[in-house]
Every structure is written in structure tokens, then in C-alpha cells.
Image (cartoon, rainbow, N blue to C red):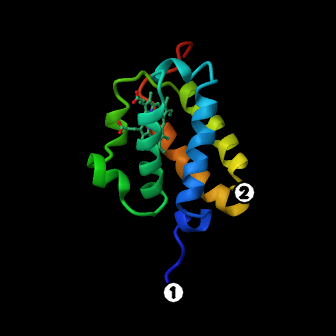
Amino acid sequence: EPAKTLYEAAGGAPTIARLVEAFYRRVAEDPVLRPLFPDDFTEVKARQTRFLTQFFGGPPLYTEQYGHPMLRYRHLRFRITPKHAEAWLACMSAAMQETGITGPLYDAMFERLKRTAYHMVNTPDEDA
Ligand code: HEM
């Protein structure tokens, strides 16, 4: 029997849906991140739900709908500093805990998100 993906271990689609809700609820209240996002989170939530599904080994829903993620490229229109990456990861960490993702599963998922978040950084901190 093949090893479970992180997506399956986390509980699949219902877990990703709850995680995305919990995450953008925090982003919408975050003073560092809020200014980068549009008023309406509907579209970005739909895209992120599809992305995280495939990122954690579930069906390739993002690519099916929007093509290759090219994630760093898609973030280049925003000035993303290390401070933004930290704020993003803090919102995600809290959202994961709210969703009940804990222990080794949390560690494995968070590690991947952390690497990706710092990969999105394209601008030095303002005071650097
Ligand atoms: C889109 C910010 C990291 C996944 C976006 C958007 C912003 C943003 C402002 C566009 C919202 C809009 O449509 O107007 C950031 C910041 C990050 C970060 C500040 C800090 C490092 C990440 C990470 C991931 C991710 C780590 C995945 C693990 C996505 C996805 C989209 C997106 C999938 C939609 C892309 C598209 O289809 O155009 N992000 N992001 N982001 N972000 Fe991030």
C-alpha cells in the first residue's frame, strides 16, 4: 500500500477548505499582509484551495484550472519582503492549529510552506 500523501493524512478536501478559511480570515486582519490583497478574497481563496490540494499531494486541481503554478513568477507583481514571509507563515501556523493539524503532520506541512514562503521573497526588508 503506497504511503499516504500529506493531503490524505491531513483529512483531504474538508481539511484544506477549513485551513484556507482560517488562513484568509487572519490575512484580512493582518496589518502587514492586508494591503497586498484585494477587498474580496473569494478568488484568491479558490486558487489557494486548489493550489494547496496539489501542493500536499492531492489531485492537481490548480494546474487543471490555471496551468503551471509558476508561483514565484505569479508573486512578482508584489513587493514581498522577509517580513511579509514571516507574517504569512504566522497566519498559516495559527490557521493550521485552529484546523487541528498538529504533531509530525504539522511539522512536515509547515516545513514545506516555510521553504515556499521564503522562496517568494523578492525584495529586501525596508530597513535592511
Ligand atoms: C496569490 C501574497 C506566499 C500561494 C497571492 C496574492 C498575494 C499573495 C498578494 C494575490 C492576491 C490577488 O489575487 O490579488 C503572498 C505573500 C506571501 C505569499 C505576501 C509571503 C511569502 C505564498 C505561499 C504560497 C502562496 C507560501 C503557497 C504555499 C498563492 C497562490 C496564489 C497566491 C496559489 C494565487 C496565484 C494565482 O493563481 O494567481 N499571494 N503570498 N503564496 N498565493 Fe501568495
Amino acid at the residue labelled 2: Thr
What residue would you read off at disc 1? 1
What residue would you read off at disc 2? 102
Q: Is residue 86 visible?
A: no
Decide which of tag 1 and tag 2 comes sooner along the chain: 1
* Residue plotted at (45% across, 39% down): 119
Q: Nearer the viewer, residue 114 or 127?
A: 114
- The image quarter containing residue 75 is top left
Q: How far apart are labels 1 and 2 at the CA level?
A: 24 Å
* Residue plotted at (57% across, 57% down): 14
From the viewer's perspective, tell me whether residue 99 is left or right of residue 7. right
Q: Is residue 126 above or below residue 85?
A: above
Amino acid at the residue labelled 1: Glu
Question: Residue 38: where, in percent of width, then height?
Answer: 45, 22
Q: Residue 58 has which mark?
A: none
* Residue plotted at (69% across, 62% down): 104
Question: Residue 2: where, in percent of width, then height?
Answer: 49, 81
Question: Residue 51: where, in percent of width, then height?
Answer: 42, 49
